[in-house]
Image (cartoon, rainbow, N blue to C red):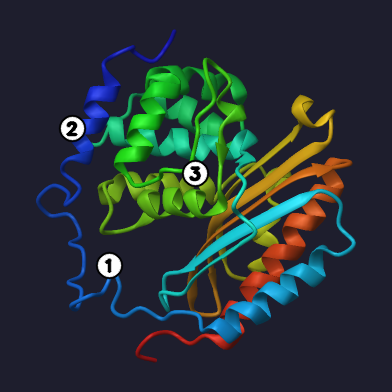
């Protein structure tokens, strides 16, 4: 049995046109003049703070093979930061978060069937590829996902063609935007769908709890990881991790993408090292707006 092959792309676009949400949805906070909606205030990292974090991350990569980049958004302070993300990375199974967002938008005002819930749960909790294939085709594959992401302002992500969703290429800041659209109370998803997505990402198979979770210590984590020995890189590993962390009073959205590690363990270590540096720096030096 397959998910019914309805015109979900059209449904996605209709749902996106009503981003304010249905009656009773949590309203987006009113922003001050010149301020981005959704924030009480914007706390921008100073040039000195950015340079210090740049240097810390550069030091962390000195003995690491391959290439790495990250982006982080502290929703508590409003601070945003990106590192080495000019060239896109292959997402591998992190693309499943993009598929999840598009699918839930297509079902925005509908209840998911038991079969659909099974597919979505397997895709996120177990990183099941067959479930991802089916859901990718349901949302319209490459063209469908591209249209949805562009409507959401995620414009530097190129979904993979055909069934090759794992070959989607993106930047860390784009994946942070995907996490925003998936979890933001003022975003395009109703509260029930947001809670559902976070429950899935907070209960992945224990063997897949690594990556950005390493930076959370005793905090709360909702994440999705991706790993793949890439033919395009002669079998070297792509290892990625994205997620929402609640750490030391901060609500963080973080994406760390890497490629060309000699093995998965090396890639995981690189991801975790960068995540720890970025999160510890932001939570140590920044305080919540109004605190």
Dot 3 corresponds to which residue?
200
Question: Which of the two discs, 1 and 3, labels the residue nearer the N terminus?
Answer: 1
Q: Image quadrant of residue 126?
A: top right
Q: Position of residue 68 (x, y in %)?
A: 72, 53
Q: Nearer the viewer, residue 65 or 176?
A: 65
Question: Seen from this angle, which residue lies furthest bottom?
Answer: 291
Are the residues at dot 1 and dot 3 in contact (C-beta closer than 8 Å)?
no
Secondary-structure class at tag 2: helix
Secondary-structure class at tag 1: loop
Question: In the rendered image of this protein, does residue 276 appear above or below residue 134?
Answer: below
Secondary-structure class at tag 3: helix
Question: Which of the two discs, 2 and 3, labels the residue nearer the N terminus?
Answer: 2
- Quadrant where the C terminus sits is bottom left
Q: Residues within 10 Å of mark 2 (few under 14, many from 20)?
A: some
Give the alpha-carbon distance from disc 2 to disc 3, as whole Å. 25 Å
Residue drawn at 67 percent across, 46 percent down: 240
Q: Position of residue 169 (x, y in %)?
A: 57, 36
Residue drawn at 89 percent across, 41 percent down: 262
Dot 2 corresponds to which residue?
14
Give the alpha-carbon distance from disc 1 to disc 3, as whole Å. 24 Å
Which tag is nearer the camera, tag 2 or tag 3?
2
Question: Which of the two discs, 1 and 2, labels the residue nearer the N terminus?
Answer: 2
Q: Position of residue 41 (x, y in %)?
A: 31, 80
């Amino acid at each position: 049995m397959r998910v019914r092959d309805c015109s979900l792309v059209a449904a996605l676009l209709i749902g996106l046109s009503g981003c304010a949400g249905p009656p009773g949805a949590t309203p987006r906070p009113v922003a001050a003049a010149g301020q981005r909606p959704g924030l009480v205030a914007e706390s921008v990292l100073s040039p000195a703070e950015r340079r210090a974090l740049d240097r810390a991350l550069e030091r962390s990569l000195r003995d690491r093979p391959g290439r790495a980049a990250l982006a982080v958004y502290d929703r508590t302070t409003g601070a945003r930061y990106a590192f080495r993300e000019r060239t896109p990375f292959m997402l591998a199974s992190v693309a499943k978060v993009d598929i999840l967002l598009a699918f839930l938008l297509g079902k925005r005002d509908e209840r998911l069937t038991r079969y659909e819930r099974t597919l979505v749960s397997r895709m996120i909790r177990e990183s099941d590829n067959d479930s991802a294939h089916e859901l990718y085709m349901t949302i319209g594959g490459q063209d469908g996902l591209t249209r949805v992401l562009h409507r959401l302002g995620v414009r530097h992500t190129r979904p993979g063609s055909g069934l090759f969703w794992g070959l989607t290429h993106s930047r860390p800041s784009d994946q942070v935007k995907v996490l925003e659209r998936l979890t933001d109370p003022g975003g395009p998803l109703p509260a029930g769908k947001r809670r559902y997505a976070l429950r899935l990402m907070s209960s992945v198979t224990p063997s897949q709890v690594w990556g950005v979770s390493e930076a959370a210590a005793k905090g709360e984590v909702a994440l999705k990881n991706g790993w793949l020995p890439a033919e395009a890189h002669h079998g070297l590993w792509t290892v990625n991790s994205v997620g929402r962390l609640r750490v030391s009073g901060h609500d963080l959205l973080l994406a760390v993408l890497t490629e060309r590690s000699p093995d998965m363990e090396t890639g995981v270590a690189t991801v975790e090292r960068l995540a720890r540096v970025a999160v510890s720096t932001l939570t140590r030096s920044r305080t919540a707006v109004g605190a």
